[in-house]
Amino acid sequence: MDVSTSLGINLEADAQRTLERVYERLPVMMYAANSAGRIVDVNTYWLKRLGYKKEQVLGRSSADFMPAGDTAERRAVWAQLMRGEEVTDWSMQYLSATGEVVDGLLYGAPVLNAKLELTGAIATVFDVTELRAAERARDQLETELRLSQKLEAIGQLAAGIAHEINTPSQYVSDNLTFLQDAVTNLLPLLSAFEPLLALAAKSVEAKLAPLGAIDDYRALLKDADLEYIRGEIPLAIQQSRDGVGQIKKIVMAMKEFSHPGADEKEPVDLNRAIQATVMVARNEWKYVADVVLELDDTIPVIEAIPSAVNQIVLNLVVNAAHAIEEAGRGEGEKGKITISTRRDGAFVELTVADTGCGIPAENVARIFDPFFTTKKIGKGTGQGLAIVRRVVIDRHGGALDVQSTVGEGTRFHVRLPIEGSVAALERLTA
C-alpha cells in the first residue's frame, strides 16, 4: 500500500514514485490517516523511531500511541484538519514500544481528492526529544542558578543582618541590666515604707518625731540615687521597646524577603517588597549611602513571583551600593540610592538610581550578560544583573532599561506588567 492510494488519490506513476521516495527517506516521522482518523500508512522513520512494526500500526488511531490523558486537545486538532485547515507547531508526545516518551512537533495538512473531497490528513512530526530535554535542562540550570544566587545573597547578608539585630539587642540587654540594678536598689527603699509609716503614725499620736527612722530612710534614698533612676527608667523602657520593635521589623522583613512560596505568580505588593528588601540589605548600603524611598501608594498589586521580585530589588540595591562604594563614597559624604515606583498604563515601573561610579559606554550593552562583571575579584559573580534580566523579561514579560554616566551614577528602570501577562509586553512594543 502506498500513501496516495491509501487516501484515494490517483497520481501519475512518476509523481507517485517521487512522493513515495520522499515519504520513505525523509528523516522525520510521517503518517497518513483517513477521514475516520485511522492510520492508513506510516513511513519507515516513524516505525523505526517508535519501535513498532507496520502491521501493529495500520488501522489504529494515532492517539493510541500517545500518553494517556485528556484527549480534548487531540480532538480539537483533528477537528481542525477535518475542517480543511492546516495544523502547525503542535507540541505533542508519543510513547515508543519500549515506553520512552518521544516529544514531537506536528505539522498536519488535510488531503483532498480530485473531486475536492476531504479524504483524510497527512502529518509530519519532527522529533524534538533532545531539544526538549535540553530546554528542560536549561530551565533546571536557571532555577538552580537563581536559587544559588539567592542563597549566596542571603549568605552575604547574614552577617549584616546579625549586626543589625545585634545593635538593638545590645541596648535592650544593657537597659535590662540597668533596670535590674535599679529595681535592686529600689526594693529596700520600698520595704522601708511600711515601718516608716508605722513610726509616723505613732509620732503623730505621741507628738514625737522619729528622727532616727527618718535619717535611715534618707540614707536609703541617697544610696538608691532616686533622682537618677526616676529620669532613666522611662528612657530605658522606651529604648528597649524601640529595640524590640527594630528587631521585629528586621525579622518580618527577612521573612518576607525569604518568601518560600511556589515558583508561580501570585498577587505581590511591590512597595512592601521594596521596603522589606531594603531593610534586609541595610548593612550593605548604610555605610556608603542613604536610601530614599519615593513609593507611589496608589500603584496596584501585580501578578508576579514574590521571591523573584525580591531578587530584582536586592540585586539592584546591592549593585547600587557597590557602585557608590567603588566611587569612593562612604568616607565623609555618603552617596544616595533613590528607589521609586509609579504606574504606567498596564505596568508598574520600579526605578533604582544611584550616585555611584557609573558604567562605561562600552560596557552598558554587556552588563546583563552572564558572568560579566567589572567589579573586583570576590565582589561580584556577574550573575546579579543577568538574573534580573531573565526574571524581568523571560519570566514576567516585563521590560528593563538602564542609563548611566561615568562619574555621575546609574539609573535602572524595571517595568512589570500588572496582570503578569506577556501580552502586556506586546502592548508596550506595539
Image (spheres, rainbow, N blue to C red):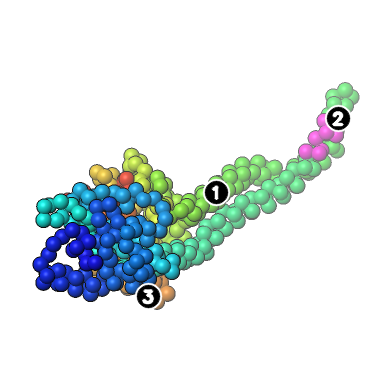
The residue sitting at the bottom extreme is 377
Residue matched to label 3: 376
Image: 227 above or below 20 = above
Cα gap from disc 1 to disc 2, whole angstroms: 48 Å
Label 1: few (<14), some or many (≥20) within 10 Å?
few
* Residue position for label 2: 198
Where disc 2 sits, the SS reads: helix
Specify start and end residues of the magenta stretch as a single range: 190-198
Label 3 or label 2, whichever lies nearer to me, is 3
Which residue appears at 65% of the width and 41% of the height?
230
Give the amino acid at mark 3. Answer: Lys
Residue at the image position 74 percent from the left and 43 percent from the top = 186
Identify the residue position indicated by label 1 in the image.
248
Under circle 1, the secondary element is helix
- Residue 302 left/right relative to 233: left
Work out whether residue 351 or residue 75 is closer to the camera in this orientation and state it: 75
Q: Nearer the viewer, residue 260 or 39?
A: 39
Labels 1 and 2: the sequence-earlier one: 2
Q: Amino acid at mark 1?
A: Lys
Q: Earlier in the sequence, mark 3 or mark 1?
A: 1
